[in-house]
Amino acid sequence: MSRLTPALSRGIGRVTEAALGPYQTAVVRIGFSATWLLFLLREFPHRQEMYGPDGPWSWDLARQLIASNHAFTVLMWSDSRAWLEAVYALALLSSALLLVGWRTRAMSVLFMVGVLSLQNRSVFMGDGGDNVIHLMAIYLVFTRCGQVWSLDERRVRRARAARARGESPAPDRAGPVLWCVLGIALAVATGAGHLGLDWLVVFWVLWAVHGLWWYVGRRALHSEPRILLDVIANVVHNAALLVIMAEACLIYSTAGWYKIQGSRWQDGTAVYYPLHLDYFSPWPALSELMSSHGAAVLLVTYGTVAVQVAFPFTLLNRRAKNVLLTLMMTEHTVIAVVLGLPFFSLAMIAADAVFLPTSFLRQLGAWTARLRGRFVPRGLARLTLPGPRGEKQPTEEASEHTPAGSRA
């Protein structure tokens, strides 16, 4: 017990005193919001056929299915074209604002609403990548995904710098206005009876918590209520981050073990067949070239299974994890190009990003800052990429010991 107590105390301290993996969470936020935004932009001309009245899956059929599975979608509130246009525009706007990190707490909720509404309206339109986005959109609501690489962090840094100079920071007007607008919209939806009891509780609790967070942050910046809210937020964030990691591991482990049971994966020919399907051959010459070498097909088939099965077991070894992570991201890049599945690959790469080392992400941020300095006017180039709130930028040597970074 004398040895267990200090370790337990340190573990509780790490979970409660800080939101772990700020860079990893930011990359996941950017990756999934960018993937969904690009998907919506590509399918913009076909939105009526996919999610509207012009599609084969009619509004009445969708209503019958949702009545049985109780899935959430605001598109069932009305079958008009104008309502679809409004929801689609909301999905586009929330994705773009979450991407740049503007009001990430509110945008993460709106992002989830957009993803669930469109995907649950036409459940037969999606693939594995859409399922991943579906789940991650829910998990992101519970993370503090705007701590780095976001407009929210830049606003906080500017306010902190103003206080350090003895000045009063500019009052936040956009936050309260957004909170009031969302509250009115939620009240209207509640009064119309569009929300079931479970989602009604979820949205009202989130709305109340966001208002409480703003009030305590302005009125009691260094008091016990703010400390308590920070502890609760850190615990919820770290739990959600753990779920995201477990979800990624579960995806790969189940995919790998199911492949082992397939006869085509056992004899090493499974990769050959999708390369000869017209639907998965945007570059027929490239597909033919890859499938013409039997040894390469055999190697890729067995290698895919080995990497997917082994990856969850490599998390305890940083070097092995980084090697397999590189292989999986390379594999998804090849899938995007050769099989014509860009959004599936982007979604999986975004999920894999939660395991990227903090040192690499910091270096990536530095490269981005230097690249921006070459093409952005000097005044704007002075804006550096932010670090975690309330935390000094560590040195390159210290970055290896950042929580939930390389040890993730």
Image (cartoon, rainbow, N blue to C red):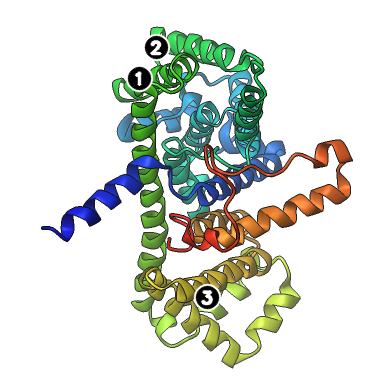
Residue 63 quadrant: top left
Q: Amino acid at mark 1?
A: Leu
Residue hosting label 1: 200
The mark total stands at 3
Q: Residue furthest bottom?
A: 295
Q: Residue 329 location in percent, x, y?
A: 57, 67
Tags 3 and 2 touching, CB below 8 Å: no
Please report the residue visible at 34 percent of the width from the left and 41 percent of the height from the top.
16
Q: Do the residues under discs 2 and 1 have CB atoms within 8 angstroms? A: yes
Q: Earlier in the sequence, mark 1 or mark 3?
A: 1
User: For the residue carrying disc 3, how many other residues have a C-alpha within 10 Å: few (<14), some (14-19), or many (20+)?
Assistant: few
Q: Is residue 325 left or right of residue 372?
A: left
The CA span between labels 1 and 3 is 45 Å
- Please indicate whether residue 126 sits to the left or right of residue 363 in the image: left
- Where, by quadrant of the figure, is residue 147 drawn? top right
Q: In this rendering, does residue 357 appear at all?
A: no
Residue reaching furthest to the left: 1
Q: Secondary structure at mark 2?
A: helix
Along the viewing direction, whichever of 297 and 49 lies nearer the viewer:
297
Q: Nearer the viewer, mark 1 or mark 3?
A: 3
Looking at the image, which residue is at 55% across and 74% down?
Answer: 327
Which of the labelled discs sits on residue 190, or is there none? 2
Of the 4 image quadrants, the one containing the C terminus is: bottom left
In the structure shown, which secondary structural element does the residue marked by tag 3 occupy?
A: helix
331 horizontally vs 222: left or right: right
Label 1: state its secondary structure: helix
**In this rendering, position of residue 91 left or right of residue 7:** right
Disc 3 residue type (three-letter): Val
Between circles 3 and 2, the one closer to the viewer is 3
Label for residue 323? 3
